[in-house]
Image (cartoon, helix red, strand yellow):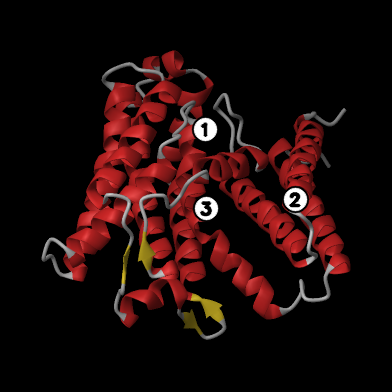
Amino acid sequence: MRVAAPQRRQLALLVLLALLVGTMAFLSEFFLSASNLLGMTRHLTEVGIIATGMTLIIMAGGIDLSVGSLLALCGIVLGYAWQEWGVGLPGSIGLAFAVGGAGGALNGVLVTRGGFPPLVTTLGTMALFRGLALRISEAQPVSGFPAWFEWIGQGYVGPVPAQTLAWGAVALAVGAIVARTPIGPFTRAIGDNKRAARFAAVPVASLELGLYTATGLLTALAALISTARFSTARADAGAGLELEVITAVVLGGTAITGGRGSLLGTLLGVLILGVARNGLTLAGVEQEWRSMMTGTILIVAAIVDRWGRTEAS
């Protein structure tokens, strides 16, 4: 019985994840403890939530390098609106989501209406959003949030971190939308051949704009969780986050050229990177060795992904 290529890729990633879990358990006796595994998901939430939206953007042939800077801007707007501008905290949360949606929409408009390459566009907005965060805050953090807000990033529902449940809800909702609506096939069609998708009456510009805007809103959600988790809003938050997100998406089997991808694969990519980082940290491995291990994981993943894409003879 022939197994489809996406299933083979996911199987290969599952095998890689299992091997990593076994290796990290051997390196540290604390790795498989429930507290460590649940705590690990807490630290992966922001990457996982944003990677859900990034998967669709990359599947459509785009990319968004501005998510880390937009996360910082949303957090700073939330903090300063509450502490300095006299807006209540619920209203400040709403304003942060408005900023996230507007930032994503700006990227979408520049790409779809302006015709600018996504790489150049989001590289520019990455600097713009970070600069705005620094200008608003003057590089000063905001802290002292109330306990009910901190619960969003630090609380538990039973033994499970609250933000892990939020990540799961986002993944399930987006997965259902992709699987049960035309958005999934349309996104793949745009990434595979944008011109052909237009001839097939796919609403290319509208869908791309929607994907960038939705990712901006997901980034605002990640900013809310990150701010609550650290109980601080900082202008330098999210530095390098875009690289982690894109790495997880590509590691999960989404083609950087578009047209192919999987939300389940992205989830596995996030977990693989998280397991490697957490396990090596517990084992006391120095930063340079952890970086080398991450590079090795990417190379191995590329090999198994190529194997997974090879049609059964």
User: Which three-letter amino acid code belongs to the residue tagged 3?
Assistant: Val
Looking at the image, tell me whether mark 3 or mark 1 is earlier in sequence order.
3
> Residue 108, percent across and down?
31, 31
> Residue 167, percent across and down?
48, 62
- Is residue 68 rendered to the left or right of residue 140? right
Query: Distance of mark 2 from mark 3, alpha carbons?
Result: 18 Å
Residue furthest bottom as drawn: 158
Query: Distance of mark 1 from mark 2, alpha carbons?
Result: 29 Å
Disc 3: which residue? 47
> Residue 87, percent across and down?
13, 65
Q: Note whether 17 is above or below 190 in the view shown.
A: below
- Is residue 205 rendered to the left or right of residue 166? left
Disc 2: which residue? 290
Disc 1: which residue? 59
Residue at position x 69%, y 79% from top? 34
- Is residue 258 rendered to the left or right of residue 30? left
Q: Secondary structure at mark 2?
A: helix
- Relative to the observer, which residue lies in front, 51 or 71? 71
Q: Quadrant of the C terminus?
A: top right
Q: Secondary structure at mark 3?
A: helix
Crowd tier of the residue under label 1, counting other residues whose Cα lies within 10 Å: few below 14, some 14–19, many 20 or above: many
Residue at position x 68%, y 74% from top? 36
- Relative to the observer, which residue lies in front, 218 or 172? 218
User: Which three-letter amino acid code belongs to the residue tagged 1?
Assistant: Met
Residue at position x 54%, y 44% from top? 245
Q: Mark 3, mark 1: which one is toward the viewer? A: 3
Quarter of the image for residue 166 reads bottom left
Instruction: For residue 182, say whether it is visible.
Output: no
Q: Mark 2, mark 3: which one is toward the viewer? A: 2
Residue at position x 51%, y 33% from top? 58
Query: Distance of mark 3 from mark 1, alpha carbons?
Result: 18 Å
